[in-house]
């Protein structure tokens, strides 16, 4: 049996009409320039995917493309025509299953692989990087969101002294914490930056009646520092941005996105797991220092009312629901 097709001599774009014949475990190709023969085992056969033609390649670089690929592929046998890939291409259910597997792998990469990688990379991040990111984040917040504090100097000194005494009772931290006082449109809040800066708003100081109440929230922020949540989130964001850029080939603005990541993460909040971890840190040390975490429970209740988060749907927030956070304190008693 023979097949008509196009023959390309080695290292040439010349096209010659040719006829291919299989016999005695050899392949023979006849053109107007003569006949060529090779052992069947020396011939390389491309995998016939879809409607693409079969391409036979010979030891010196000659190629033959048949006019009718399917019958030649059948004659060559499964071992020579990529049976598995050809079968896969012909079965839509198998293609769908393959796509689902790819989607699952991508989801696992972003949900588990990149977070795990970010945790392992954090210890290798130079301290100077953490310092620069923290400083730039604070400068951006001061420029666009925060305003100078209106707390009296005496109040600032008092809170600072209470905080210093608190930190002196804690295990060694990856960075040295320091307080900065700001206003944030009347919002009671505190933010921990990657360089150890903890920004405390005037409204948060006013919300606390006792040092223990204020310290309970500051301990939560110290928990973020202890577990380096800010740096982990930034590394994770960098990995995700870089991965997306590699997958899509679109890297425009990648550097700007990474530089702005600190502000975005701080304003949107850490993951729920990070928040729970910081809550557990604060609760543990509140109990060790004050004997219980009642002051923390009171502050959570007040924050929920002051910032109108008490009725917020938990699945819409990066933070656990305030009710769930309060119940975690009560259940730990």
Image (cartoon, rainbow, N blue to C red):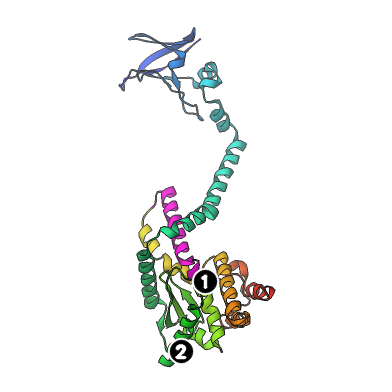
Q: Main secondary structure of the magenta part?
A: helix
User: Between marks 2 and 1, how big is the CA–CA gap?
Assistant: 22 Å
Q: Which mark is residue 320?
A: none
- Of residue 202 and residue 284, the one placed in the foreground of this image is 284
Q: Is residue 122 above or below residue 142?
A: above
| Residue 168 counted in the magenta span | no
Residue visible at 47% across and 59% down in the picture: 236
Q: Which residue is mark 1?
A: 223
Residue 186 image point, x, y percent:
49, 84
Q: Residues within 10 Å of mark 1 (few under 14, many from 20)?
A: many
Q: Earlier in the sequence, mark 2 or mark 1?
A: 2
Judging from the image, what secondary structure is the residue with disc 2 in? Answer: helix
- CB contact under 8 Å: marks 2 and 1: no
The magenta stretch is 223-250
Residue 14 image point, x, y percent:
31, 20
Residue 204 image point, x, y percent:
51, 84
Residue visible at 43% across and 18% down in the picture: 43
Residue 279 image point, x, y percent:
58, 72
Q: Which residue is mark 2?
A: 158
Residue visible at 47% across and 75% down in the picture: 191
Choose top left, top right, bottom left or bottom right for residue 97: top right
Choose top left, top right, bottom left or bottom right for residue 60: top left
| Residue 238 counted in the magenta span | yes
Split into 4 quadrants, where in the image is the C terminus? bottom right
């Amino acid at each position: 049996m023979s097949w008509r097709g196009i023959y390309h001599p080695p290292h040439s774009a010349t096209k010659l009409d040719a006829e291919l014949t299989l016999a005695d475990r050899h392949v023979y190709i006849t053109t107007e320039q003569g006949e060529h023969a090779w052992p069947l085992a020396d011939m390389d056969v491309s995998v016939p995917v879809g409607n693409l033609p079969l391409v036979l390649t010979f030891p010196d670089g000659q190629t033959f493309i048949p006019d009718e690929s399917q019958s030649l592929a059948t004659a060559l046998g499964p071992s020579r025509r990529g049976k598995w890939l050809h079968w896969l291409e012909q079965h839509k259910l198998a293609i769908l299953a393959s796509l689902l597997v790819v989607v699952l792998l991508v989801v696992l990469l972003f949900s588990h692989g990149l977070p795990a990688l970010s945790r392992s990379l954090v210890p290798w991040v130079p301290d100077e990087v953490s310092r620069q990111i923290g400083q730039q984040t604070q400068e951006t917040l001061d420029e666009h969101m925060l305003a100078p504090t209106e707390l009296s100097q005496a109040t600032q000194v008092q809170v600072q002294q209470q905080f210093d005494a608190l930190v002196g009772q804690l295990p060694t931290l990856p960075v040295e914490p320091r307080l900065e006082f700001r206003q944030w449109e009347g919002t009671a809040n505190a933010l921990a930056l990657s360089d150890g800066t903890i920004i405390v708003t005037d409204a948060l100081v006013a919300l606390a009646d006792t040092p223990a109440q204020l310290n309970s929230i500051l301990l939560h922020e110290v928990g973020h520092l202890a577990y380096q949540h800010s740096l982990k989130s930034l590394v994770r964001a960098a990995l995700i941005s870089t991965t997306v850029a590699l997958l899509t080939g679109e890297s425009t603005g990648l550097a700007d996105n990474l530089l702005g990541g600190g502000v975005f993460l701080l304003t949107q909040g850490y993951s729920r797991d990070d928040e729970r971890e910081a809550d557990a840190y604060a609760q543990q040390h509140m109990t060790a220092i004050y004997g219980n975490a009642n002051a923390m429970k009171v502050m959570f209740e007040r924050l929920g009312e002051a910032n109108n988060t008490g009725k917020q749907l938990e699945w819409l927030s990066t933070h656990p629901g305030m009710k769930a956070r309060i119940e975690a304190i009560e259940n730990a008693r």
